[in-house]
Amino acid sequence: APCWPMQRDTAGAAPASLRAAGRRPRRPLPSGDPTPRRSRARREWRRARDLRSRARRSQWHGIPGSKALNSELLLLLPPLRSPRPTYMARFDAAPGPQLKPAKVRYHQVDGNSLTIGHVVSKTPPPPGSTSFHSVEVVHAGGPVAERLRRAPRIDATYPVRFNELPETGCLPAREFAAIFEVLEGMMLAKANRQSLVLWVGRPDKPELDGFAGFLGMLPFRGISVALVSADAVRYPDPFSYRTPSGVLEHDANDPARMGKCCVSAMFGPLPARSFTARLREWAPIDVQPPAGCAELLRLPFKIAGLPLPMITYAGEYEKGVAALAERISAAYPAGSLCPIVSCGEVVDRLGYGLDVLAALRERGHAGHYFTHKSGETSKRWAEYGKPELLGWVAQAKAAGQTPLFIAVGGGCNGNATGVVAAMTGAAFVEVPTTPLHYNDATTSAKKAFSLVLDGKIRAKNLLGTFYLPRLVWCINETFLTSSTASVHSTVGECTKTMNMLADPSSAAGRADYANILGANEFASDTTRILSCIDGFEALVHFIEDAPTREAKAAVLRLGEAIAEARAAAQCGTETARAAYASLCEGRRQLLQRFRARFYELPTAARVAIDAFLTVSNKEIVGAKAMFLAYEDPFEKYRALLFEYAHTLGHAVEAWLAGAIDTARASGVAADIVEAAVRNHGQCVGMAVVWAGAIAAELGALEGDGYVCHQGMVYLFNSFGGFSFGPVRALCDALGVSKPDFLREVLAGVRLDNKRGYCECGDDASVDQLVTHRPGRMLGSEDPNAEVRYMVVVSEELQRRALERAFELEFDLVAHLDGGEIAFKPLASHPRPLGVGAPIAAQVRKLIRASCDADAAAAAAEGIVCGPASDEAAGDEAAGEAAPAPRRSASETMSLEGTSPSWSEDDESASLSPFSRAATFEAELCETSEARPGHAPPPPAAALKPASPASKPAAAAKRDHDLANGGAAPSGEEAAKQLAVPGEGSFEIRHSGRSMRAARPRVGSAVASGEASAHPPAA
């Protein structure tokens, strides 16, 4: 719906007196009250801040008047006084849904005079930038595209590349392939989130304009799209896109897309106007467990303020499948649903997908069954864009049915199936069968394919979208058929989360993440997972036990026979169908006996395993909800914390997946190949150790902080699931040398999907590092960085970490020697089972001590934040320090040099609300309530702000006198008071506009081995 009609209604126009005087009327509040949004005190405070800022600049930029005179002028200005900031207000807020209707502007242009420069100037730039990195023109021929191709370039500040959409012939599979072929070409040409995709339509084929929406939908880190339509009859719908076949569609009004709009601006021959989306109401398959029901559990979770039902069924497997089918059937009328169950080869052999489809058929919902290859190298669009799969969707839509994709299996299947569901506008349900899929993949709205070329993964999760499932249904007994690699993968992601968050419910943790909106609803101590080490070891021991392995192998062998007989049963005789049914019954009985083995374990082992799964699921789901519930549902800013250790982790995972496929095809011994398998979370766990080593080399992580960081992984390495040794053995079997390994992995790093958040060259990448202790992230010095904890890490540092891994320097396990944590080689010092709990307790003790020390140090400096809740008050009464607010880097700064060149850093004009990190305390608070999009102060960095004790006594006396109405000193005296003791150094403290001294970008600092001292914005 348009924001206003073409002929604007004058009923709401400004009064004539204001229009005549050239004044703009005040923007009214939503209630209609014309009262300005900011109070008078707030406006006066801003004016005083601006005056002080100008006076400060005049000292260094040649404005008439001596420095001493300008210093005196500065002191004569009224002191800046702002109300006491409520630092925890954002953390403790209870906001509602965060969906905002998208708005798109249509600009009138003449196709004969249209230029790329005009489109670029009218399209909103990406957050954190004032220009585009490159322009990717996509077209399907036509006169406008041809004229743009031949037109001379006037502005050559950005490269322009032309991409032609292949002919599709209105076939869904060809449309699907054409979209990904164009996007893959752009990604290989280094297009990123700072690029502009310019779709140029044809006057004779306006239906092709729907492709523009999919080009902006799929690069899930974000990309700007401008649609140039040649349709002179009607406006293109900026929120609803369809390909000519009608099978692929995107509707931004669907709340499952969380208000994401794929097009930033539109251009065409019609009169200019604006459009606003109308979001529909979120309608998940809501499941509320009955009171007293121990079998049905619901984990609290939200994305963008929308509740997402995450159900754990703790009872018998068959009853769990029946309960799932019952809930789905109740949500859709009979005959209105077309379920499409998707699963990989392994899950197909276990029969989980067929069981779900059979249960739905019993309730009157006939559907289809889609299987695909398993593994990361099969997580590509060509594996899922099959004509039969898209044909089923077309049939369902033609019959007026709702296509429902049900992804049964692991994370690869869930991610890829979610992309197909999103591209076809189908409903989506996830049934995870691995712990990592449940607590990590389903708790993210992002669904993506990897960039796979010639059987090799060039980049992980590069092309995808954001799409919410209607329901997540997990049956605990399916976890028993997980592999040890899958269990280690779960723990690897847990170590990442524990290192980046630690305990956000503690005093120091609350201060570290005070700027996360509504975080208090889900914050808890993630390090509780460490205490479940015995349950982890018991589960891995059960899976690796010889009888368990043989029982699972028997099920898989029978499942393979069932897969071969399925085709014959579908189109064969009654005898073939009876034989097929007999095989399925045999598999069901084998699985029942397999699960019975688990219930034969000692009670202590079963309780420990249950505790491990329960605690890890709860803590990781809660940690994801902390950031996704209200703050950053699209995971483009603060929620990028969850990409910690993924830069190297993704690159090694992609290389290893190809190496394992090569080894299997080359006939390498099966035991070598299977031992080298490292799933996603395992590669992340290894990369956590490598990230710790890089931070230690930079001097950002040392002492107990380093021990805790590395110890989280080494604690869980008693089985070698995070050791590089088996991978090295695979390299030796394939003849892969260390230089070959480094070259392949670093090539993958250069295509990492976080590029574009900071400026970095080809010899560096955007990454994240922990500093000081778990729970605190290193901050960036790049003033243009969209996210302040995104830092530039040189490729040389990454190379050294990978070299050390290749030489097995990190193949260690944690021990406890004399009460101290020690890391020893796993090969020579294996740790027996059941002795990890004291090590876990020691790691948690060190983390708690470090957090308490930070809170106490902040309190000693007078940076004390009062308790924001009864819980915080109780902590304070119990002797724990209350959360302390964090000062920004530009508030307290000590720089070397005699004549620095100051530059103003007002981020509010160019950066998104999520990246306003180095702003000042007073700017972060309102007299009444926080303004939307304004974040509280960021977490502290490794280096503490200068102590108030370091302030010169004369300067402190001057501030005290001014605050109490005293007279300002003379110019000469003021100049002395502004100085800070120290040869050639000075310190500036104020609460005005952010001022930063010109200094090398973080890329050069980190590349030379220097850690950033600036605090991040989590």
Image (spheres, grey):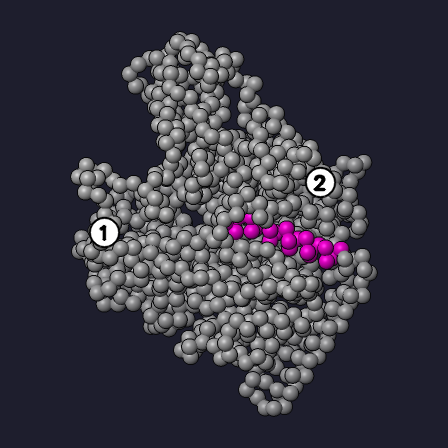
**Would you say 165 lies left or right of 485 here?**
left
Q: Magenta stretch: dominant SS?
A: helix
Can you say whether 452 is above or below 81 in the image?
below
- Kind of residue at badge 2: Val
In the rendered image, the residue lying farthest to the right is: 602
Q: Earlier in the sequence, mark 1 or mark 2?
A: 1
- Kind of residue at badge 1: Ala
Name the residue rendered at 47%, 48% in the picture.
636
Name the residue rendered at 23%, 47% in the picture.
13
Figure quadrant of residue 758: top left
**Residue 443 in picture, x, y percent from top left:** 56, 56
Is residue 616 rendered magenta in the image? yes
Mark 2: few/some/many CA within 10 Å (<14, 14-19, 20+)? many
Circle 1: element type: helix
Q: Which residue is mark 1?
A: 11
**Residue 749 in picture, x, y percent from top left:** 51, 48
**Would you say 498 lies left or right of 545 here?**
left
Q: Which residue is mark 2?
A: 843
How far apart are the two marked residues, 1 and 2, measured between alpha carbons? 67 Å
Could one spot residue 452 in this view of the protein? no
Circle 2: element type: helix
Stretch in magenta: 608-630
**Residue 89 in picture, x, y percent from top left:** 52, 40
**Residue 26 in picture, x, y percent from top left:** 29, 40
